[in-house]
Image (tube, rainbow, N blue to C red):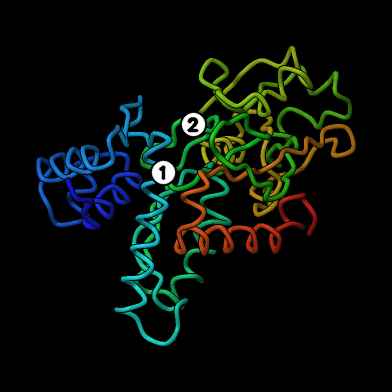
Amino acid sequence: MALQSDDLLILLEVSRTGRFTAAAETLGLNHTTVSRRISALERSLGGHVLVRASGGWELTDLGLRAVAAAEEVARALSALEGNDDGASRLSGVVRMSATDGFSAYIAAPAFARLRRDHPRLSVEIVAATRRASQTRSGLDLEVVVGRPQVHRAEAIRLGEYMLGLYASREYLADYGTPSTITEVLEHPLVYFIDSMLQVDSLDAPRRLLPSMKDSLSSTNVFVHVEATRAGAGIGLLPCFMANLHPDLVRLLPEQVAERLGYWLVARPDSLRQPAVAAVVGALRAATDAFEDRLLGRG
C-alpha cells in the first residue's frame, strides 16, 4: 500500500494531542476516520506507529520517524500557503502543563506577548504541580519543579525561584513574631497536602521544619498565599508571589531561603515544531526577565 502524506499529517496531530478524538476535532474529521487512516499508515510502513499509554497514545520508534517526516510535509505545505515571512505563519495549538505560579506570572504574560505577533497561535495550559510525565501524551511540553528524570525527552533548565516563610501582619500581631526556627516550629504551617505531594523538591518543610504541624493544606499555591494572608498560619510561599502583598511579612530570610529549579521537558519531535519552539523561546526569555522577582529580589 502506497504511503499517503495525509496519513502522516493525521499522525502528527495525534502525536500532539495523544487522542484520536481530539485530533479528529482539530482536523474536522470523525474518530473512526482518524483510526482508519492510522491503521492504513501502519500497513504502509509495516509496523505500529502508536502504542496505548496511561495518558493516551504514545509514539513508537517508527512513529517518531514518521512524525519527523510529517513535520517536513507540514513545513512544505506551510511554505506554499504562506507569505514572505515564515515566522508570521506560526499557527496551531501548543499544549503545556506547568505549576500554578509559573503559569500565571510567567507563562500567561509570555504567551500574550507572543500572540501579538502570531495571532493564529493558541496555547493551552494545564496548571498542575507534579513530576514530569514519562509519556507526555497530549502535551507538547511541561514545566516542572526540580531536575526531571525522563527518557526519550529533553530537559531544559529555565531558572530558579525562592521559597520563604511568610505570615500576615495581623497574624503576627495576634501570635507574636518568631525570631528563631525553634519558635517557628510552634506555629501551624500553610503548604501542600503532604500525602498528595508528587514533587520531591517541594518536600522542604519535612527537612527544614520537620515538627511543624499542618494548618491549612492545598494542592494550589494561590490557596497557600490567600490562607496565609487570612491568618491560617505561617506559609512557605514562593517569594515572587508573596512579595506582591504588603500585608505579608517574610520571616527569617537568612535561615529559610529554599531555591528550587524550573525545568522544561519536551520530546525532541515536539521541539522541532516551529510553534512549540517559539513558545519555548518565549518561556525562556520571560523566565530570564523575571529572575530578580523569582529569587525574592525587588
* Label 1 neighbour load within 10 Å: few <14, some 14-19, many 20+: many
Quadrant, the C terminus: bottom right
Q: CA distance from mark 2 to mark 1?
A: 10 Å
How far from the left and from the top, in percent, is residue 23? 23, 48
For image coordinates 68% across by 34% down, the residue present is 147
In this view, the residue farthest toward the front is 1
Q: Position of residue 79 (x, y in %)?
A: 36, 76
User: Could you tell which of marks 2 and 1 lies nearer the N-terminus?
Assistant: 2
The image's mark for residue 133 is 2
Give the residue drawn at x 38%, y 38%: 62
Q: 64 or 3: nearer the eye?
A: 3
Residue 50 vertical placement versus 123 (above, below)? above
Q: Nearer the viewer, residue 31 or 199?
A: 31
Q: Position of residue 156 (x, y in %)?
A: 65, 47
Identify residue type, mark 2. Ser
Q: Is residue 275 above or below residue 152?
A: below
Other-residue count near label 2 (Cα within 10 Å), few / some / many at <14 / 14–19 / ≥20: some
Q: Secondary structure at mark 1?
A: loop
| Quarter assignment of residue 71 | bottom left
- Identify the secondary structure beneath mark 2: loop
The reply to whether dot 2 and dot 1 touch (C-beta < 8 Å) is: yes
| Residue at 29% from the left image edge and 51% from the top image edge | 13
Q: Which residue is mark 1?
A: 139
Picture quarter containing residue 208?
Answer: top right
Is residue 286 left or right of 19 when viewed as pictured? right
Q: Can you say whether 159 is above or below 42 in the image?
A: below
Q: Which residue is depicted at the point 36% across and 41% down?
A: 138
Displayed quadrant of residue 252: top right
Residue type indicated by callout 1? Leu
